[in-house]
């Protein structure tokens, strides 16, 4: 294709086969990026041409039967043998078998494997290794390897998620993935000096950057062990836009359909209105439309932040790693939760036709919803963000200045909302900042009281984790609202566009408060009167957005081919499309289905069962 931008390439492939989940998905999304980000220049020189030209087709094999979340608990081992200068990969237990990696069962002939590194009798934690699993000549499985598919899943039918295990498989030492120094272009001798305190080894064998194993098995630990988690941070930063895309497409389908569908006379003898004119339909769909816009903006922000921070990491500056981890983990969870729930509401809003594959909605749902699980189970990811917020809170209490998006933490909470009938965007942001700051403080206070009451750190953590989850969710929600407001206020949009988009942004903020009212009212921040302002504003915004609703979904500019929906067609010819879809169903290619003779005829006409038996023998 010649497209160099990863996300653009991903979207181009999505256009060609929307939500089909390509059997090469992991090759593009994780195998290639892992080589690019975690391999040395010599390894890249060796592997990239093969991988980019589909000689090597790979996946990212990390999760095991017994462990997915807890990477440090993975059981696959890679033990260094200094005599042969090889790693011995082994799956010592049933639960150590790799299980779930996409494109693993039948497609890939290589994979990058996360395994516990052992050298000189010591464990050094999870590291990545390049492993060939099938012949590049005839695709046969190589000795010492068991591989296959895991069977039917909730969705992802076109992806051969698989299992994989090793029986003391030997791979060359050069197959441990490690990138050369991240300190930029320092002279080679400095690079050697920087890492090799034990012995100088030829540069081509120097396994630099994050960590290395010398020929004698000496291990040099990385600058930060989590650098090996880099591919996951990349995908988490990409999933936000992916979730936004799924929700936006579901909004296009359901809102266009709601403009075509007419149902129930508005008054005796009256015309049946468009269902989009029902306030309840607007209440369910318009906030999702606003959320789709908000998540698209959030997705752009987090991916750009990933690119900036990753550029710094390449230069050896790891300072922003914690903030990127907290942002990408939290937004990945927040966006996939919001998109999955929203796509399901869009489906339900389309009535019976929403339940048909012809609507395109089930396919979008089963493609987006696993994003709540893969690349870091959402609750676990939110708790990772909460871990960062707790650190920020204690720094704020020590009077330290906080970076970027967490400056609201530790603010004075003895204030009331400025909300008026107008519902200014600034008052909305202030409300979300207050809610998040209050929940962060409440979680920190809970932790503190449990520890003061004698609980150990891990007991206090678990005993506060619900409040920690609430705090992280509120932090992500604040991010999305403020990022949306900043975009509206910063954009040099035409006055008409600003007016329309300001209503959409206001609705996102207002609806979020009304749907989480307890968290906003618990400390009296809002008065009952101010809640009334918000409720009236929400209903007014529905009326305000209604005339532009179809234009707002058209603006996403998804072609019919990508939507794959009879309900969301640009030309609105829904019923003809549904009928044509039904007529084309395989079961309609014969008037009487073959199962009639074997199963129905003996019931309906038992006297002619012999005919049925004859047919059954056909
Ligand atoms: C560009 C691509 C283009 C398009 C793609 C678009 C969209 C994507 C669409 C589809 C997706 C395609 C394929 C996806 C298929 C799915 C693939 C997978 O699922 S791969 C497997 C994923 N598995 C996971 O994500 C496992 C989750 N678990 C973890 O990450 C870790 O175990 C943990 C939960 C973070 C815990 O780690 P650990 O126990 O080691 O660390 P601690 O909790 O003790 O914390 C210690 C310390 O480390 C910091 N930290 C943790 N992780 C990171 C990190 N990644 N980066 C930076 N720092 C990290 C943590 O904050 C702590 O810091 P401290 O508080 O001590 O300062
Ligand atoms: C469609 C799909 C594709 C996938 N593709 C890949 C792939 O290509 N490569 C790969 O390596 N993996 C892949 N995976 C696996 C995926 O990464 C894991 O399923 C995911 O990391 C979750 O881990 P788990 O399944 O072990 O769940 P668990 O961690 O067992 O989660 C189960 C429950 O336990 C809770 N829990 C776990 N730990 C904690 C904690 N510390 N605190 C609080 N609660 C906790 C979770 O919140 C969750 O509710 C894929 C999974 C799916 C569904």
Image (tube, helix red, strand yellow):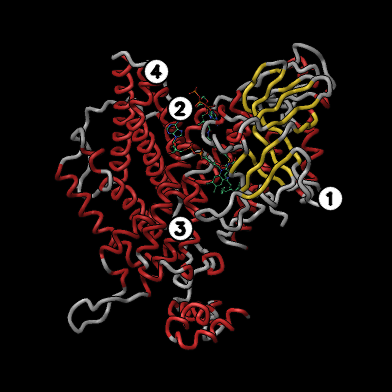
Which quarter of the image is occupied by the C terminus?
bottom right
Residue plotted at (21% across, 38% down):
521
Q: Nearer the viewer, mark 4 or mark 1?
A: 1
Between the C-alphas of marks 4 and 1, the distance is 54 Å
Which residue is labeled 3 in the image? Answer: 248
Residue 168 visible in the displayed image: yes
Relative to 30, does residue 467 appear above or below in the rendering? above
| Mark 1: secondary structure | loop
Marks 4 and 1, the one that precedes in the sequence? 1
**In the picture, residue 334 is in which quadrant?**
top left
Q: Nearer the viewer, mark 4 or mark 3?
A: 4
Between the C-alphas of marks 3 and 1, the distance is 43 Å
Relative to 466, does residue 355 appear above or below in the rendering? below
Q: Residues within 10 Å of mark 2 (few under 14, many from 20)?
A: few
Between the C-alphas of marks 4 and 3, the distance is 42 Å
x and y percentages locating residue 481 in the rendered image: 37, 44
Between the C-alphas of marks 1 and 2, the distance is 53 Å
| Mark 4: secondary structure | helix
Which residue is labeled 1 in the image? Answer: 137
x and y percentages locating residue 265 in the rendered image: 23, 78
In-front residue for pair 604/4: 604
Figure label count: 4
Which residue is labeled 4 in the image? Answer: 457
Determine whether, in the image, residue 79 is placed left or right of residue 97. right
């Amino acid at each position: 294709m010649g497209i160099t931008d990863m996300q653009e390439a991903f979207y181009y492939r999505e256009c060609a086969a929307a939500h089909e989940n390509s059997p090469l998905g992991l090759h593009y999304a994780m195998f290639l990026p892992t080589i690019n980000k975690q391999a040395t220049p010599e390894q890249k020189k060796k592997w990239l041409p093969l991988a980019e030209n589909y000689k090597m087709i790979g996946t990212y094999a990390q999760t095991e039967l017994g462990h997915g979340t807890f990477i440090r608990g993975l059981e696959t081992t890679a033990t260094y043998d200094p005599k042969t200068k090889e790693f011995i990969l082994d799956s010592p237990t049933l639960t150590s078998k790799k299980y779930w990696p996409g494109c693993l069962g039948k497609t890939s002939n290589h994979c990058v494997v996360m395994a516990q590194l052992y050298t000189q009798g010591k464990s050094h934690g999870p590291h990545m290794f390049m492993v060939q699993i099938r012949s590049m000549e005839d695709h046969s499985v190589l000795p010492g390897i068991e591989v296959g598919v895991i069977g039917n899943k909730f969705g992802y039918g076109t992806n051969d998620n698989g299992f994989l295990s090793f029986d003391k498989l030997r791979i060359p030492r050069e197959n441990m993935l490690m990138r050369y120094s991240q300190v930029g272009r320092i002279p080679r001798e400095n690079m050697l000096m920087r890492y090799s305190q034990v012995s100088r080894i030829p540069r081509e064998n120097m396994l630099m950057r994050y960590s290395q194993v010398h020929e004698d098995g000496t291990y040099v630990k990385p600058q930060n062990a989590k650098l090996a988690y880099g591919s996951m941070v990349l995908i988490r930063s990409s999933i936000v836009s992916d979730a936004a895309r799924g929700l936006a497409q579901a909004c296009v389908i359901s809102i266009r359909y709601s403009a075509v569908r007419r149902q129930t006379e508005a008054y005796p003898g009256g015309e049946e209105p468009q269902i989009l004119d029902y306030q309840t339909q607007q209440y369910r769909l318009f906030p999702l439309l606003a959320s789709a816009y908000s998540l698209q903006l959030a997705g752009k922000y987090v991916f750009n932040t990933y690119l900036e921070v990753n550029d710094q990491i390449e230069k050896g500056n790891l300072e922003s790693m914690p903030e990127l981890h907290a942002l990408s983990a939290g937004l990945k969870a927040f966006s996939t939760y919001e998109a999955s729930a929203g796509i399901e509401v869009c489906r339900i809003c389309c009535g019976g036709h929403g339940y048909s594959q012809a609507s395109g909605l089930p396919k979008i749902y089963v493609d987006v919803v696993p994003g709540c699980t893969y690349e870091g189970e959402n609750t676990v990811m939110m708790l990772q963000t909460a871990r960062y917020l707790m650190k920020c809170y204690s720094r704020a209490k020590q009077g330290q200045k906080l970076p970027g998006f967490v400056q609201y933490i530790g603010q004075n909470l003895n204030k009331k909302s400025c909300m008026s009938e107008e519902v200014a965007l600034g008052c909305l942001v202030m409300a979300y900042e207050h809610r998040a700051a209050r929940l962060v403080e409440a979680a920190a206070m809970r932790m503190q009281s449990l520890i003061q009451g004698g609980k150990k750190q891990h007991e206090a953590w678990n005993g506060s984790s619900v409040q920690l989850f609430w705090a992280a969710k509120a932090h992500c929600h604040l991010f999305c609202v403020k990022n949306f407001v900043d975009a509206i206020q910063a954009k040099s949009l035409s006055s008409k566009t600003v007016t329309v988009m300001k209503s959409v942004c206001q609705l996102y903020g207002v609806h979020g408060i009304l749907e989480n009212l307890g968290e906003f009212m618990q400390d009296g921040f809002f008065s009952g009167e101010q809640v009334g302002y918000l409720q009236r504003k929400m209903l007014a915004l529905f009326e305000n957005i209604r005339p532009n609703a179809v234009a707002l979904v058209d603006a996403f500019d998804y072609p019919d081919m990508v939507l794959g929906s009879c309900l969301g067609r640009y030309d609105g010819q829904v019923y003809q499309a549904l009928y044509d879809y039904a007529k084309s169903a395989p079961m309609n290619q014969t008037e009487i289905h073959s199962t009639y003779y074997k199963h129905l005829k003996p019931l309906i006409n038992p006297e002619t069962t012999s005919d049925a038996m004859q047919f059954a023998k056909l």
